[in-house]
Image: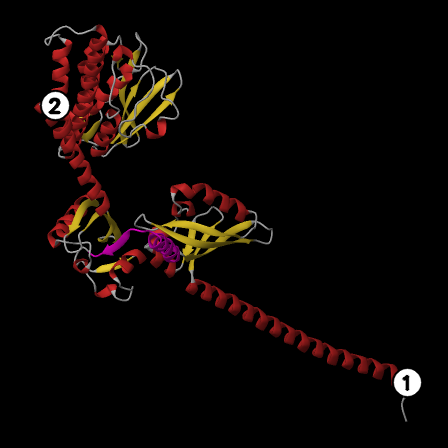
Amino acid sequence: MVDLANTPTLLIGFLVLAIVVLSGAAIRRKDQLSRLQDKSLRDKELEVAFQRKALFESGLVSVTDEEGRIIEVNSKFLGAFGYRQEDIIGKHVSELYPEEEQKLSREIRSKTRGGSIWTGETHVLRADGSKALTYNTIVPFMDGNNKHIKNLSFRVDISRQKMRENQKLVTTAFDSMTDAVVLYDPENYQVCYMNTFALAEHGWDMDEIGEKTVWDMIYVPDPAIIAEKCKKIAETGKCSARLENEANGKVYDAHSYRVAVAADTYRILTVFREVSQNVELERERKRLISIITHELRTPLTSIKGALGLLDSCAMGPMPSEAKNLVGIGLRNSDRMLDLIAQILESEKAEHEVRNEPLEPINIGEAVRAAIAANQGYGAELGITFQEPVESSDLWANASERVLDQILANLMSNAAKFSPEGSTVDVWAERHVDHVVINVRDHGSGIPKDLQPQLFSRFIKADQEVRGNVHGSGLGLSIVKSQVEHLNGTIDFETAENVGTCFRIALPLLEGDQDMVERRQASA
């Protein structure tokens, strides 16, 4: 029988026991949850560690702090760009960017500070100063208060990929050419590459050229020529030569250039252009000059002499109408003989300039000397040659004789087409890496229809020239060939009723003081 008096005590005992049991279960459950949370956290840490390890092992990784200073890099980064750990840690990330990408560096930092990921192509300066092109993904890290604390940069070096793409573009361009393009090793003359045109001319394919040398090609008649050319390319970086192969009767112009493939290794790229037809035309031109010299000048001289006798009435008096006709014949004979003389002088000038050696010339002094030498000619036409600004004492490789001829020709042209009482300005100045000689008149300008062919032979303006001075139209064509012999260029600016300025640009010679002093001592 149950003692009802003790029932509350029993109930309390049961309740206490239940609470103890439930508390124990709760504690065990909490402990289990805690262990699960710890395991999940460890798993998460392991996952992050694994991801970090994978990231650091697969790419070029760097980490920067909130100020942009590099605080960590992986070994791949160091190996790819040639740095040591102590060289790179603490550097500001902007120091890795070349000068032209400093603005981009600032834009990247501004974007990532706001929490945005940045991706794109950037260059990285290697330890040796060279540039590597990379595809860069920059991930910003923010703290609990959404404040930027660091950036992780993951780079992939795409320099070789870009190089391969560029090589493909170059190869495609070469293969579209109708000139032969050949790349070969100057050490053993082994052919490395031939474009489609060159392969077709030889009947070869790309698989065969690995066994071929320069001597197997149809373009090379004499090994000594190529050996000498390679020597010149090693010294100057480029060379041109004319090759005549008696075996096939063809003539080629070869233009060669040094192409670097490594720090101390290079190949020679040569473009061969067949000019057999041009050579034949040149021979025909020389034959024509010979005909002009022997078959035209001599009879014209005799005709002029006979007309002169008639004009002087040595054969008796003539009616006035006949005397006028004789005078016309004399004047036309003089014009023809003068034209023949100018043609022959043009041929002589072009031949001489090809054999004229070049030496360092003070261009400022040459300009002042030309002004002094041509002042008398200008006075005859009422023109003053002047130097509007003092010419800089700049140096270029040239020939004093050829330069004098160039300036005399341009200055006389300017004087002939300038109004009486005006000036012709002549001066030299520096433009980047060139010396530019300017000859400026204040005449009526060059007609538009004449400008495209101004430097061709026998091109003359229909403008009135002063002092009854006429030319053959050969002067500017001679000037152009002379300027090109000096490795320069010539162009002009002109405006109607304002005038014309011819500009000659010659490569600047950065002479040292010793050279200047030697030149002055020999003057």
Q: In which quarter of the image is the N terminus?
A: bottom right
Side (left or right) of 481 relative to 110: left
> Along the line of sight, which residue is nearer the eye, 405 or 292?
292
* Snapshot quadrant of residue 278: top left
Left of 418 or right of it: where is 326? left
Instruction: Look at the magenta stretch and give its main secondary structure.
Output: helix
Is residue 515 visible from the viewing direction of this image?
Answer: no
Q: Which residue is drawn at 22% across and 26% down?
A: 394
Name the spot of residue 52 as percent of width and height, x first: 48, 64
Give the residue type at disc 1: Ala
Report whether 444 appears left or right of 237: right
Residue picked out by circle 2: 520
Residue shown at 32% from the left, 14% from the top: 464
Looking at the image, which is closer to me, 107 or 334?
Answer: 334
Residue 438 — which label?
A: none
Q: Is residue 252 above or below residue 415?
A: below
Q: Quadrant of residue 449?
A: top left
What amino acid is found at the position of numbered circle 2 in the picture? Gln
201 falls in the magenta region = no
Residue 69 at x, y percent in the picture: 43, 48
Q: Residues within 10 Å of mark 1 (few under 14, many from 20)?
A: few
Looking at the picture, how far across and down is residue 57, in whole percent? Answer: 42, 65
* Quarter of the figure with the C terminus: top left
Above or below, 147 against 503 in this view is: below
User: Looking at this rendering, what residue extends furthest in the left direction?
Assistant: 522
According to the image, label 1 marks what residue? 5
- In the image, residue 403 lies at what x, y percent? 19, 25
Q: Which residue lies furthest to the bottom in this view?
A: 1
Crowding at label 2, few (<14), some or many (≥20) Cα neighbours within 10 Å? few
Q: Nearer the viewer, residue 373 or 351?
A: 351
The part of the chain drawn in magenta is 159-185
